Image (spheres, grey):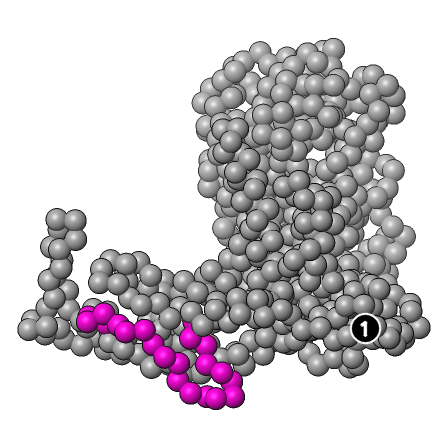
Amino acid sequence: MANNGDQYFNATFRSACHIADFSPLLMRPRARTLNHFSSPLSQGAKPFLPASRVDQTLADNFSALNLSSPASGQMSSISTPSPHVTPVSVLPGNSPSQSPGISPTNSPMLIRRNDSPVPSMRQNPVTVKSASNTIQENVGGTTYFYSPEDFAPQYQGVQVLPSYSYYPGMPAHIAHMKVKTNMPQFFMPDEIKMELLNRHACSLLQIDPAQNPDIPNEVDSYNQLYPLEQSAANPLQKSSTFSYPTTCYKAVNTKDGLTYCLRRIHGFRLANTKCMATIDQWKKLYHPNVVQLKEVFTTTAFGDNSLIFVYDFHPVAETLMLRHFTAPSTLNGYSGTLNAETQRSFTANKGATGANGPRQHAGLLPESLIWAYIVQLSSALRAIHAAGLACGVLDPTKILISSKSRLRINCIGIFDVVNFDSTQGNLVSLVPHYQQEDLVALGKVVLALACNSVMAIQRDHVSNSLELVARNYSADLKNLILYLMGSQRRQRSINDIMPMIGARFYTQLDAAQLRSDVVENELAKEVENGRLFRIMCKLATILERPEFSIDTSWSETGDRYMLKLFRDYIFHQVDEHGSPWIDMAHMVDSLNKLDAGVMDKVTLMSRDEQTMLVVSYAELKQSFESAFSELLSATQQHHNNFA
């Protein structure tokens, strides 16, 4: 695998650059020198410099770029240009648009093809072409007319891009959001890492078919079913939302290999397929706060007539009920009881206000979190109603929470199928009525969150619940609840609550953008970690290879021997006591220098301390790429022979 960074750099600028241009690669000065030798050199050890062949090859390669000596500071010689190209002087640190090391040909098309694809940030105004200087050229029977000004350098102060890549450090605009540590952070924080690992583990869960004979091995085109909900004590217990027993499974689609969530409706026979038109509308709805519906089908794989709804799978997500309301009793589809502190807050401390009021002692949720939920749920309802649909499942047991506060409405479309009645007239005319019920359901969810108990929505407790909201939260939150749960005599819209949300919407937008900045910074680290991982993979394919082209000593001779010693220099360091010296900064720094091919020197020693090499990273990179290219060429040739 070729180094894309070098190819991009050479193809873009094709210019000489001073050796000092590579110096920024040094991440930080080392606090101490590496003690690679745990004991003095043996008597027969002699310092050994690379053979002249290596130096001469490197010199020949770099002479093509006309690199000037750092000490001389003189201009490099330039090949004789063609008549239509203006000669350019090359100074150390400059990067002209035309390469001084590559003699331009007479064809203008080649020059255009080799010009830098990156536009200059500073350009001089294009000069007016002179008709007297027009050059005529015939190529392949086609006559081209061009002017010398077409190919003259028009850039000044062109930025010099490095030929290497590494993580430059945390951006300043998010530094204040991170916990400051004295150690460099090469990897993502443990919090994000554990969350992602838990998601991966949840996606890979499997069951023992022998212990779960009631779960089929395959349902339609889905296999590897795994139950996502605890089995009910009574298998025939009906869902309070759909009036049918339901079960949820994780499954893998054999067609695309992706993981989905299957919601099974037990014992449901689909008598009329007219409701599938509404399902098609749901499948077209995509919103970040709605779990998307993929498909619906019937099956007898479970031993009965079951209806299967297929949704996107969001691992490690939990319902709003489990996150905020956990209690044994059931009431109107909600589970939970008023905790003692909330009950007392209905009747006591009526005059308490301030920071130490009932909200702190009653364990109520922060108002900012409640508004974050309101913004997401209202946004989802706005998209659903705009599509001419009604949610029908706005229930704490059907709202999923991912991460800390990311909400998604689950089980969409089920209400439209299980409650479908073909005897009713125009079904479209009933949608506005169900949309009004969605607003009432949203008001109940918000009231339950504000009181930290689902019992607060009982008719006997509503007045006390609203009084609790008035004492502990802003007037806007109370007015929003009153509006949503108010009289349905007039038509209302989800858009009407936007003035009540007000500037809090911008707070949620700001939080989402800051979160995006933090995640992008962590992604930037992993991009560079992936690059270093590819370098290590290349080294592993070269080193310790048993044989190559019937040569059992291929990996131990020639340029590969230097790479073997360099591997020991990176990973097998020891301190003055002979103990392993493990320094992640040293490993990252050395691999980055190898990838860049800087001119810094490094001392390599054999394990028997009989051979010592002093080489530059540029020489190591040349040997590294040469050895790996040799492996790739052999692989390609083998494939061509059997093609």
Residue 69 drawn in magenta = yes
Is residue 156 a member of the stretch shown in magenta?
no
Question: Quick check: 87 left or right of 116?
Answer: left
In the rendered structure, the answer to whether residue 602 lies left or right of residue 6 reads right
| 239 versus 186 height, above or below | above
At horizontal 48% and vertical 67% (from top left) the residue drawn is 61
Q: Give x and y (percent) for residue 210.
A: 86, 19
Location of residue 440 by image quarter: top right
Residue 483 in view here = no
Q: Would residue 619 be seen by someone viewing this image from the given angle?
A: yes
Give 137 or 558, whichever is nearer the viewer: 558
Residue tagged by mark 1? 45
Q: Residue placed farthest to the right in the image?
A: 577
Q: Give the number of callouts.
A: 1
Q: Find residue 600 and report its image quarter.
A: bottom right
Magenta extent? 65-85
On screen, residue 132 above or below 303: below
Answer with left or right where residue 638 lies relative to residue 50: left
Quadrant housing residue 391: top right
Q: Residue at x 46, y 28 (%)?
A: 428
Quick one: label 1, few (<14), some, or many (20+) residues within 10 Å? some
Q: Camera-side residue: 430 or 83?
A: 83
Q: Secondary structure at mark 1?
A: loop
State whether the magenta stretch is mostly helix, strand or loop.
Answer: loop
From the viewer's perspective, is 616 left or right of 585?
Answer: left
x and y, in percent, of residue 140 in the image: 16, 49
Q: Residue furthest toward the front?
A: 44
Q: Amino acid at mark 1?
A: Ala
Q: Position of residue 49 (x, y in %)?
A: 67, 73
Q: Which residue lies at the image location 70% right of the left edge and 13% below the top edge? A: 301
Q: Nearer the viewer, residue 282 or 97?
A: 97
